Image (cartoon, rainbow, N blue to C red):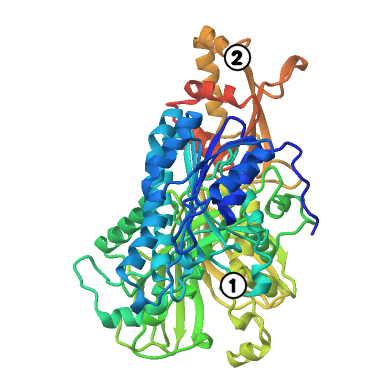
Amino acid sequence: MVAPKENTQQLRYDGRVVVVTGAGAGLGREYALLFGSRGAKVVVNDLGGNFHGQGKSNAADKVVEEIRAAGGVAVPDYNSVVEGDKIIQTALENFGRVDILVNNAGILRDRSLARISDEDWNLIHDVHLKGSFLTTRAAWPVMKKQNYGRIIMTSSNSGVYGNFGQANYSAAKLGLVGLANTVAIEGAKNNIHCNVIVPTAASRMTEGILPEILFNELKPKLIAPVVAYLCHETCDDTGAIIESAAGWATKVHFVRGRGCVLRTAIDEDVSPEYVQQVWNRVTDMSEATHLNAIGEASLSLVGVLEKLRDGKNNENSVTETFRYGFKDAILYALGVGASVIDPTDLKFLYENNPEFAVLPTFFILPGLLSVMGSSLTASAIKHTTFDLTNILHGEQYIELFEAPSTEGVLTTTSTVLDVVDKKSGALVITQSDSYDEQGTLIARNQSSTFVVGAGNFNGKTKAGPEVKPLVPNPKRSPDASVEVPTHKNQAAVYRLSGDLNPMHIDPSFSAIAGYKVPILHGLCTMGVSVKAVLKQFGGDDPSLFRAAKVRFSKPVLPGQTLRVDMWKESNNRVCFRTVVVDTNTEVLSGAYVDFKQIVVIKPNMTAAVDLQSDAVFAGIKDRVAENEAKAKAINAVFLYKITSGGKVAKEWVLDLKNAKVYEGPVQGGGKADTTMTIADGDMIELALGKLQPQTAFMKGKLKITGNIMLAQKLAPLLKTEAKL
């Protein structure tokens, strides 16, 4: 590894006053010497006792002499930290202020738990915890008045992890972490930072305890620069725990797991037996997260209670977190056949493409993985047992309520919606609702799982009205048909998006299920088909997608060619079926895609000339004509690029310098002050107030170049009452 270059500008502390407690030797001495060499005026505090807190010496004087000999400024202080106000008074009497306080003083009284005396316990807490508190409290009003302060608390690995024979010491050291957290919170408004150092250094306290080879490398001077930086005015950290030793440092923080609800309703009690049953989920740290404030912990608990009150936490419900980024979206697109051979697919395959987007069916994954990773299906069928070879995916529905971002975190709650007795098997319908980090419902999925051989349990024979029905194809010739080849490796690629059922990769496993070779995932076939419909009738624009439903009739073998037959209906719905060309077998039935708007792309042509957003600009044109003076006051030229199918379909210019609104590029050879790119459908949502400009910008729906601030002046012109 190449070492980083030294910063050419030296960090200085000129004009700063630093108080270091326990600075007569070891770490404290190194802190004092370093601060003194960098221009600080240093108060070297040391009572002068040994590491048991006994006796006195002139240790502070020696360090002061070292600092002065090197050209620095320092004074000694011989007070105990339990008289912290006297230490701070020394700084004020000599230098008139206190900018930095390093609480470093410490002693040891190691005893096993049973042998710790009251004196051993109290003395350790007095020096470490109480002493740090008293000295900090004394410096606090001075720092508040200055509106500046940097405070260091010194903890220990014994406090973080515990250590045999140090119950008194470890308790005090972890107590300092809690003290520092609160000091950081209360000091924030006055520019007072407080951080914790967890050092491991060779000193009088650790000699004879640490192995010799380790003791010789744990030089205190290697830790001093870390503390010095934490105390510099350029360091923004506060409330941090930094561990450092031997020329190495890292941040330490506490995390907690996702946890498990221990009751199924707000009015139920918790039983020890149920705690035992779910203990592995209680202690599961695979999804551990760090909380930055106590308020976050309280907020998450409120969420748990709200779900209990709504009756959402029961054996037929599970909540999971789904994190995704551009790599996940691109891998999924490759899995459903997106290719660089088709230039219109590049926006699904390249994260830096200006129109980078996620295919709508990608958002089946949060619900799918939530259900697959749980016991929901098993909990719904209690009269028999089954395994993966008995499970078939029957139907799938997906609906998008908001245009999802290209990366983010979704929280998905999945429930058993219905169980139907199909005699030859049981049909378990689950519903999965996925919410973003703001609590907005993004996607809803309904999955119908057919469990072969689990029927005849005297259950209901038809699904309830809440289950989205299939739609039969119109009895006429398709309005469009598209052939899409699959490739031999398609199942191997698609499974990497999360559906790891061995039936799609392991020949021996698929043979047990009755297939000669591993079959393609039904959801892969759905993704391929919906992508084809989106290209044909949705302008290849994912933002126009609303919902889709399919029934998986027959399996597809990787390498077969699919034909997607489509029927355009009058209600922005496209019905479709998918057929394997090689065998003329229908594999997706009763299927449809619902669009917010249907845009037909003809061969070798861009989107239709007439766009819905034309009405918005007509309205803007009228308002500009009625209020020329107000429009000219904005004094800027705006260019709107309206996209459809991922391509710019039309341009509109708002020349508010001359109170003109017209279609086409900027006239007269001029340039726009601000250029905005937005999809036709999103422009409608923006004009109707259903989509806020800030939200559109943050989610990547509205792209702005040029003078971004000018765009804020357009809000009154964009609002419309027109019946679009």
Q: Nearer the viewer, residue 518 or 312?
A: 312
Q: Which mark is residue 210?
A: 1
Q: Position of residue 331 (x, y in %)?
A: 67, 63
Q: Nearer the viewer, residue 565 or 81?
A: 81
Q: Residue furthest top?
A: 629
Q: Visible in this render: residue 464?
A: yes
Identify the image quadrant of residue 332: bottom right
Q: Nearer the viewer, residue 683 or 408?
A: 408
675 sits left or right of 193 in the view? right
Q: Earlier in the sequence, mark 2 or mark 1?
A: 1
Please tell me which residue is depicted at 42% across the width and 88% down the height of the picture. 424
Q: Position of residue 61 (x, y in %)?
A: 56, 45
Please name the amino acid that badge 1 sits on: Leu
Vertical order, 613 against 359 (above or below): above
Q: Nearer the viewer, residue 378 or 325?
A: 325
Instruction: Please give the count of numbered marks on the rendered protein.
Output: 2
Please tell me which residue is depicted at 46% across the width and 70% down the height of the picture. 447
Q: Position of residue 75 (x, y in %)?
A: 54, 38
Q: Which mark is residue 656?
A: 2
Identify the image quadrant of residue 522: bottom right
377 sits left or right of 311 in the view? right
Please tell me which residue is depicted at 69% across the width and 24% down the height of the picture. 664
Identify the image quadrant of residue 8: top right
Q: State the separation of the CA atoms marked 2 and 1.
A: 75 Å
Vertical order, 100 against 112 (above or below): above
Q: Position of residue 143 (x, y in %)?
A: 44, 34
Q: Residue furthest left?
A: 267
Vertical order, 325 against 151 (above or below): below
* Within-10-Å neighbours for mark 1: few <14, some 14–19, many 20+: some
Please tell me which residue is depicted at 56% across the width and 64% down the height of the picture. 204
Q: Visible in this render: residue 549?
A: no
